[in-house]
Image (cartoon, rainbow, N blue to C red):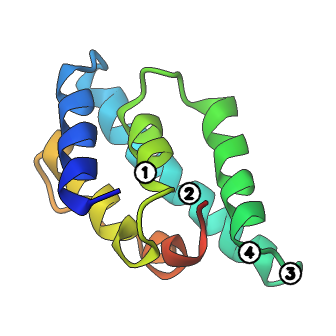
Amino acid sequence: MKLKDILMSVTATLIFNGCTVENKIHDFYAVCDYFKELELAISSTAMDHEQRNDFIMARIRANLPETSNARIAWEAISSADSEERYGLFKYAADSIQNTDWQCEPMKELAGSTGS
């Protein structure tokens, strides 16, 4: 899928999604926390790309509603080109929160986590 198509799709979905501001902000940081957990888990267990994505998705599905902007963003972005995943997710977080969102664990692991 082309980067432009992914950005347009994710942005449109997020704009029309009806989460509260508090949930929008919290959910993106929650996904960052899941990547922190993944960072700790892979230090003791070998995981391939799919297993890493399953690890993240299990936490997202268990803790974030289907209407969560962060959930929608990662579900769409996890199949994007590996080098673009963090940038796309950051773009979504920045757009929704109107801030400079950062997540070092995701920055390091997003490229090796996904389908």
First in sequence: mark 4 vs mark 3: 4
Q: Disc 1 to disc 3, how far (Cα)? A: 25 Å
Of all residues, the one furthest to the left in this rendering is 98
Q: Residue at x 42, y 20 (%)?
A: 67
Amino acid identity at mark 3: Ala
Determine contact: label 2, label 1, CB under 8 Å. yes
Q: Pointer 1: what residue?
A: 29
Where the C terminus falls, by quadrant? Answer: bottom right
Q: Residues within 10 Å of mark 4 (few under 14, many from 20)?
A: few
First in sequence: mark 1 vs mark 3: 1
Q: Position of residue 29 (x, y in %)?
A: 43, 51
Determine contact: label 1, label 4, CB under 8 Å. no
Query: In this orientation, which residue lies closer to the viewer: 53 or 40?
Result: 53
Query: In this orientation, which residue lies closer to the viewer: 6 or 100?
Result: 6
Q: Residues within 10 Å of mark 1 (few under 14, many from 20)?
A: some
Q: Disc 4 to disc 3, how far (Cα)? A: 11 Å
Amino acid identity at mark 4: Leu
Amino acid identity at mark 1: Tyr
Determine contact: label 4, label 2, CB under 8 Å. no
Amino acid identity at mark 2: Asp
Q: Pointer 3: what residue?
A: 46
User: For this view, does 10 lie left or right of residue 108?
Assistant: left
Q: Which structural element holds mark 1?
A: helix
Q: Which structural element holds mark 2?
A: helix
Where the N terminus falls, by quadrant? Answer: bottom left
Q: Position of residue 96 (x, y in %)?
A: 19, 40
Q: Pointer 4: what residue?
A: 40
